Amino acid sequence: MKERLDILIVDDSADDAELVQAYLTEAGYQARWHRVDSRAELAAALERGGWDLLISDYDLPGFSALDVLGEVAARGLDMPSIVVSGAVSEEAAVAVMKAGAHDFILKDRLMRLAPAIERELAEAQRRAEHQRTQALLDAHTRLLVEMTSALGEGIIVLDPEGYLMLMNPEAERLLGWSADELAGRNIHDIIHFQHADGRPYPREFCPMVRVAGDGTAYRSDDGEVFTRKDGGTFPVSYIATPILQDGRVIASVTAFQDVTARKEAEAALRESRERLRELTAYLNTVREEERTHIARELHDELGQMLTAMKMDVSWLRARLDDAQPEVRRKVEGMTALLDDTVDSVRRIASSLRPRLLDDLGLGPAIEWMVEGFGKRTGIRCELATSHDDFDLDKERATALFRILQESLTNIARHAGANQVEIALVQDGTGIALSVHDNGRGMDLEQAGRGKSFGLLGLRERAHSLGGSVHIDSAPGHGTLIEVFLPAPSSRMENTP
């Protein structure tokens, strides 16, 4: 037996209606029937609703099948409608089909009615399922739009060929285009067709398009721009992600941000950092000049005065006789104190700025420093140099001397080492200094977070001259510091 049907029959002939009923009953349909033969009855029945099928005669008193179909259409009803009638013209049959009838059957061929009903009911079911699916899809789409509307990023959904499927309000705001304006258009050709420098960006190289081909997500954090509707560009950070179904890419989602503010902040930070480095370099230069001046004053002025006092005391001691032993002892004590003071002045002056560095150059100054460090600390030092005399300007010589001085100071204070290997090598590209100790080492990540001003000072001195500093260390494995300063003619590009 077929399913139970509620059938609305529009016919002014009860006999014809009963004939239709008989054919359907014979075809196995269980049905409830309701026959109407006026426009008012038809309207009331349609308003009541619940009909699975409408069967109408073509020619009715006061109205026709076209009017019946018009009433159905006016109410937006998707109901299988079949016109059953006697002979009519071909034009009338075509008009009925255009008006919305699903089939036209002549009364002398009612054997076609049951198959037509079965077909149209199946079609109606498919349409209903499609409408439910479409309604669910529309609901999901609305939910997706509402969710993406709450995000602070622009969202673009593309089909596998790169054509727009969805765009959220933030993307509309950033790009100046509405989703309706870009619907069905290739997005790359509109917003991503050029590089930051204006060069063309071919579609085949576009990551937003290619992600739909290879199914691999792509992230761009720098260097790319999108073009607004007004023709202006802005730097973007974006990630393009494929949407897969049964292993096949059916769409891609691109989430992007305008990073203009970040770029401006980074540029301002770089400028500020460069200014600070210039200030640091200037302060180092001023400090070296001050040290040189103070060292010279101590050595030349105070040293000479102390030497003169020592000569005067020696003159007094030579003229004292043995009858004044207490005075002689006092003068001898003064002489010893003056000797110690002269040595202290020389040591302080050398610490401030060794004259060896200015008079004899970097090589002898480093040899003097390393030798003195070994004597003071008891740490065995090995020094290897590629030259006896290094061809360096004052800036580089001073920087390397201070870097080595700071490195040795750190070793004495913190490393717990008993051996230090130092190498100084110069070639046509520049000069390299390495300091390697066998001490306790350090955690570089933790040192970077702490107040390691000594290490920071090393980097800043090298950076101010276009150089670099590499530090390799680990707890229990000592520390290696490598410094390279390029020759003035091959100065490297500064790096943050």
Image (cartoon, rainbow, N blue to C red):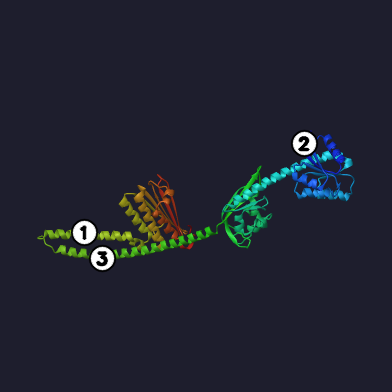
Q: Nearer the viewer, residue 143 or 492?
A: 143
**Of the image marks 3 and 2, the number of the one nearer the N terminus:** 2
Task: Check whether the beta carbons of the residues at disc 2 and disc 1 lie within 8 A of each other.
Answer: no
The numbered mark at residue 233 is none
For disc 2, the neighbor class at 10 Å (few under 14, some 14 to 19, many from 20) is few
Q: CA distance from mark 1 to mark 3?
A: 15 Å
The single residue placed furthest to the left in the displayed view is: 323
**Of the image marks 1 and 3, the number of the one nearer the N terminus:** 3
Q: Nearer the viewer, residue 352 or 443?
A: 443
In percent of the image, x 20 and y 64: which residue is there?
311
The numbered mark at residue 4 is 2
Q: CA distance from mark 2 to mark 1?
A: 127 Å
Label 1, on which residue? Answer: 337
Q: Quadrant of the N terminus?
A: top right
Residue 178 horizontal/vertical position (percent)? 64, 57
**Of the image marks 2 and 1, the number of the one nearer the N terminus:** 2
Residue 398 horizontal/vertical position (percent)? 39, 60
Q: Nearer the viewer, residue 275 or 97?
A: 97
Task: Check whether the beta carbons of the residues at disc 1 and disc 3 lie within 8 A of each other.
Answer: no
Q: Secondary structure at mark 2?
A: strand
Q: Is residue 391 visible?
A: no
Label 3, on which residue? Answer: 304
The single residue placed furthest to the top in the displayed view is: 1
The kind of residue on which mark 1 rests is Leu
Tell whether 488 sits left or right of 363: right
For disc 3, the neighbor class at 10 Å (few under 14, some 14 to 19, many from 20) is some
Residue 236 horizontal/vertical position (percent)? 57, 56
Q: Secondary structure at mark 3?
A: helix
The kind of residue on which mark 3 rests is Gln
In percent of the image, x 16 and y 62: which residue is there?
317
Which corner quadrant of the image does residue 86 belong to? top right
The kind of residue on which mark 2 rests is Arg
